[in-house]
Amino acid sequence: MKNFAAELKWRGMIHDIMPGTEEALNKEMTAGYVGFDPTASSLTIGNLVSIMLLVHFQQAGHKPIALVGGATGMIGDPSGKSEERNLLSEDTLKHNQECIKKQLEKFLDFNSGNNKAEIVNNYDWFKEVGFINFLRDVGKHLTVNYMMAKDSVKKRLETGISFTEFSYQLLQGYDYYHLYKHKSCKLQMGGSDQWGNITAGTELVSRMANGKAFAITTPLITKADGTKIGKSEGGNVWLDAKLTSPYAFYQYWLKVSDEDASKFIRIFTLFRKEEIEALEAEHQKNPEVRVLQKALAKDITVRVHNQTELERAELASDILFGKGEKYDLQTTLNALEGVIPETIVNASEFKEAANVTDLLSVVTKSEIFPSKGEARKMITGGGVYINKNKIATPDQKVDFELLNNKYLLVQKGKKNYYLVKVN
């Protein structure tokens, strides 16, 4: 068995650790869990930190448990939130849980060994718990003073917190007690904002089961500029290819700063310490080649998506930022479909366009060129291509062959590409 805590330490993945945790884990195989909030149909790259905790935990010989909060997802965790969250329906939560399960199966081994991973849903035990019984059997073990002292509650006192969200730490604490009792689970892990909820659980294990449970939290991962990881100009970076394309996912990691790349490659990959240090040394020789960022982006894209999507993302990147002219038209189209902006026009509008200037401005609703004047200017300057052919004159007829019977590939300048889809 590997030393799990030591592995997390050199990777910079420990914020808090309860005394005695490392010693307990080194004695025997232990079951430990992380909770995932099913309020969306996909996890984000922010959740990758928790996923990697479970991956390292399993690789160290321990049994990882992923708890999908079907019950607690109906309440909403106040940790890190400035206001009350909207509550989701049971059907929506069930759908989200199934989606999250499929994503976790890409990282963890659920099929073999004594330490095979397991997914549990806290709705399975909370649906049997009555309100009166819960207050009597669980609520009496934690004082209001104890619960008010938690950061997740204190930060909300000024703006207001409902009893529903105030009770969340009791529910999460009961999860730990239930898993301790029924799954011999002795470790809960999560982000540093979860420390209050996790220690409420260790307290319940102690008081209700006379047992000893442990806790580890990771730092909340931020970029060098102080912004939260997982956010981009377009919003969250999701693990679901339908919500964030593999190309956009790959590009997110490729664009991180040198400082962030050095930190992230320890947290989000399985590279050994010596491998990372060798990559860093190579990177320092030629920072402009971005060796660290490329190694990071490749590794994560393959594990979240697959090798085929990585290769497609690399090809699209080369076309958009390298030398796109070296690729044939069909290869270019296949690589960029779903990656570049797409504008839809009706077949009748397409046929009736007076000329290419009209097509690229009026017919495409100013999405490529805001005006006929700008379209004419760039075409005259030789900066517009359709299906890789340079447009010679602003008055050229619209008689282009549609690719795959529906597309025109428009290039505006060196790096701006668009797909015109003709319905």
Image: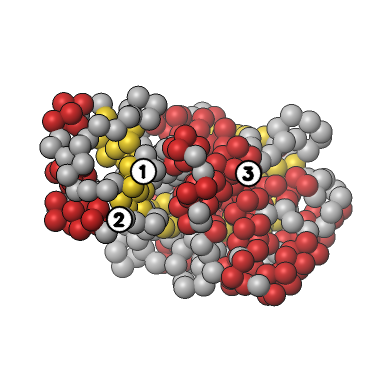
Determine whether 82 is above or below 115 in the image: below
Identify the image quadrant of residue 415: bottom left
Determine whether 327 is above or below 295 in the image: above
Mark toward the start of the polypeptide (3 vs 1): 3
Residue, x 68% and y 75% (percent of image)? 284
Q: Position of residue 363 (x, y in %)?
A: 16, 39
Q: Position of residue 29 (x, y in %)?
A: 82, 45
Helix, strand or loop under label 2? loop
* Gap in angstroms between the C-alphas marked 2 and 3: 39 Å
Q: Residues within 10 Å of mark 1 (few under 14, many from 20)?
A: few
Identify the image quadrant of residue 137: top right
Left or right: 148 as drawn, with respect to 47: left
**Amino acid type, residue under disc 1 in the picture:** Asn
Q: Residues within 10 Å of mark 2 (few under 14, many from 20)?
A: some
Q: Residues within 10 Å of mark 3 (few under 14, many from 20)?
A: some
Residue topped by disc 1: 389
Q: Are marks 2 and 1 in contact (CB under 8 Å)?
A: no
Residue topped by disc 3: 302
Mark toward the start of the polypeptide (2 vs 1): 2
**Amino acid type, residue under disc 2 in the picture:** Gly
Identify the image quadrant of residue 276: bottom right
Q: Which mark is residue 382?
A: 2
Q: Quadrant of the C terminus?
A: top left
Residue, x 50% and y 33% (percent of image)? 99
Q: Position of residue 189 (x, y in %)?
A: 63, 53
Left or right: 236 as drawn, with respect to 191: left
**In terms of depth relative to the viewer, which is nearer, 216 or 244?**
244
Task: Using the rendered image of the protein, determine whether residue 123 is visible from the camera's viewpoint.
Answer: no
* Gap in angstroms between the C-alphas marked 3 and 1: 34 Å
Helix, strand or loop under label 1? strand
